Image: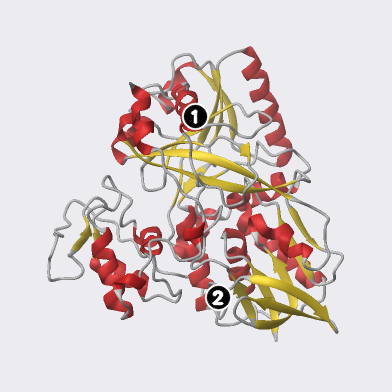
Amino acid sequence: MYDVIIIGAGVVGTAIARELSRYTLKIGVLEKEEDVSMGASKANSGIVHGGYAAKYGTLKGQLCVKGNKKYRKLEEELNFGYRQTGALVIGFNQGDEEKITELYENGLKIGCQDLEVIRGEKLKEIEPNLNSEVKVALYAKSVGVVSPYEFTIALAENAVANGVELKLDNEVVAIEKIEGKFIIHTNKEKLEAKYIINAAGLYSDKIANMLGIEDFKIVPKKGQYILMGKDQGHLVNTVIFQVPTNKGKGILVTTTYHGNFMIGPNAEEVSGKDDVATCTETLNYVYNTAKKSIPDFNIKKALTTFSGIRATSDTGDFIIEESRVKRFINVAGIDSPGLTSSPAIAEMVVDILKNSGLRLEEKNNFNPYRKGIIVRKDNNFHGKVDDKDQAKNIVCRCEQVTEAEIMDALHRNIGIKSIDAIKRRTRAGMGTCQGNFCRTRVKAIISRELNIPEDQVTLRGENFLKSPVRSEIRLVRELGD
């Protein structure tokens, strides 16, 4: 019998698991994919938002500001990759300036303390490559960038290290409540729990429906991105937004935590929750809109395109509450700024559990620390391909990933065996050649270290291969012609 079972191992589910691992509880996390962070937590902008864009009085606004303040300490503890960059919301005309003023005033009401409206030379000081037609901007100093999948992996590893049981490839197919306890049926086993936390992202409405809860519906919204190399990272210092529309925060220009230049996303309702294909028409829109912010980037150097599906609720806000089925807690509709808010969401869920009657006794041996996997290289690093020293043997030339780093990722406390799982943990395959050099080498190491045949080493895991994935990278590079 578990005290708590969490359904979903995205950033929200793993943040809750880590927060609950502070207490003497038996906790399980169920995830239908072969790894954590396989949904929206993997494919998003990676922005730690400032909170000014969320409407005053909403959970989104409240939790975004609280969550933002926790990232510096979390980075010190978990080593996942975070840096504070600041952000600009830029305006070109009087109408944009009015919207920026609204954002500024809304941010003050929510509790943002770092906002400033700037013009003229200060804009150029912050962003020298900004479009010269930009007249005004809202400057939010607390905004940052994070590696979202590395953050989720770090939360999961630390939760497991503190006693949480993570069950991958374990899809919930039915839930019953009998005699005050939940019976959870998965594709592999039957489990019992006193409490359930529904953090199933896009499928949180489906999970709720299993107990007859039909209070909300998840509307999938797709956002498409174009990722470029680090050689264009110098073009932008902050996260640059244009004024938001009723469709969302709009097309942004940023660098990732690791320094890649990135633009996107759009926002479009889609019928399929697993439709992560990209299309040239949308990517053309992303490209042309981003050029209004930073005109001089080179689309011909694009590395890849990707998309993510946001779990938007028809209520318009986060849903974080004990449902009408007692001890079943919905944590649903966590779209943007869900990544930013996740640490604060976790604390809110702990309070809900406490108020619902769960006894919380703090451990005296909780360990908040987790060692990072990626080792930052400096100019003195002397690694080379086929070096006999595993710490210097370069497997991925583009990102300078060593054999030792791949082995480290494989032998941690989350059982992984796919090439993409290694990619998310070490960046092997994320460089200019997009894995053409290192993919077979990574596959061979996985096979050797896990003692499995190479033909059992998949690219993305068996379940994930059912999803349609299409990249329009060749056509995107032609946009600059």
Q: Is residue 207 visible?
A: yes
Residue at position x 29%, y 66% in the image: 443
What secondary structure is marked by label 1? helix
Q: Is residue 25 visible?
A: no
Residue at position x 64%, y 41% in the image: 51
Residue 336: assigned label: none
Please name which of the two marks, 2 or 1, marks the residue nearer to the observer.
1
Residue type (three-letter) at the residue carrying disc 1 = Glu
Nearer to me, 351 or 205: 205
Vertical placement of residue 373 versus 24, above or below: above
Check whether the beta carbons of the residues at disc 2 and disc 1 lie within 8 A of each other: no
Residue at numbered disc 1: 281
Nearer to me, 154 or 127: 154
Give the mark count: 2
Vertical placement of residue 35 versus 106, above or below: below
Q: Quadrant of the N terminus?
A: bottom right
What secondary structure is marked by label 2? strand
Residue at position x 75%, y 66% in the image: 351
The image's colour scheme reads secondary structure
Residue 166: assigned label: 2
